[in-house]
Amino acid sequence: MWPVLIRERHDEDLPVCVDILRAVHEQASYPINWPTDPARWLTPEAALGIWVAVDAEQVVGHVILTAAGPAAEVERLFVDPKATGQGIGRQLLQHCVTTAAALDRDLSLEVVDNRGAAVHLYRRAGWLETGRTPIDWGGEHASELIRFTAP
């Protein structure tokens, strides 16, 4: 696939992002627990940047870079199920790596252990697993949170 356009998320993108998130949740159980207010969940106060991937003027992916003290974290990374397997997640992830480097911040992320495709993406992109933490909020879907640091 040709690279998609990665741009800042606009207010008018938010309903589309919520719709895509709903589709991801229904097909892949991400997020495991559906947020009470998905639009707010997609707009955390600690955001350093919120971006969407756009292909043919359609939003097809989403990612947030948040502040975590002096470091940064990748959060809310998802791709429209109709557009998976085209490298969009990898492009969004790389955008966060580039942005965190420009901000001189170390970068990490966390993912639950039921997200096989996501874990595979992070490993293929050179991210390093740095630890696992048991969770009690994953129900039957997940039992651990896996922490990765950027290459």
Image: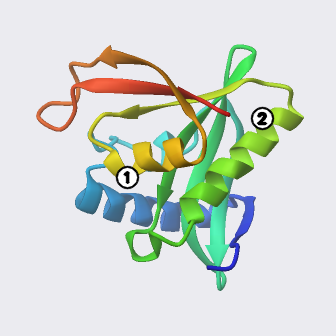
Badge 2 element: helix
Badge 1 element: helix
Is 12 on the left or on the right of 98, as rendered? left
Q: Quadrant of the N terminus?
A: bottom right
**Residue 70 location, quadrant:** top right
In the image, residue 88 sits, relative to residue 109, either above or below, namely below
As measured in the structure, the alpha-carbon distance from the residue carrying label 1 to the one carrying label 2 is 23 Å
Q: Residue furthest left?
A: 140
Q: Residue at x 62, y 43 (%)?
A: 64
Q: How many marks?
A: 2
The local crowd at label 2, few if under 14, some if 14 to 19, many if 20 or more residues have their Cα within 10 Å, is many
The local crowd at label 1, few if under 14, some if 14 to 19, many if 20 or more residues have their Cα within 10 Å, is few
In the image, residue 56 sits, relative to residue 39, either above or below, namely below
Residue 100 badge = 2
Residue 117 badge = 1
Q: The disc labelled 2 sits on which kind of residue?
A: Ala
In the image, 28 versus 16, the foreground residue is 28
In the image, residue 110 sits, relative to residue 123, either above or below, namely above
Q: Quadrant of the C terminus?
A: top right
Q: Can you tell which of label 1 and label 2 is closer to the viewer?
A: 1
Residue 146 image point, x, y percent: 40, 26
Residue 23 image point, x, y percent: 33, 65
Q: Residue at x 83, y 34 (%)?
A: 101
Residue 46 image point, x, y percent: 65, 28
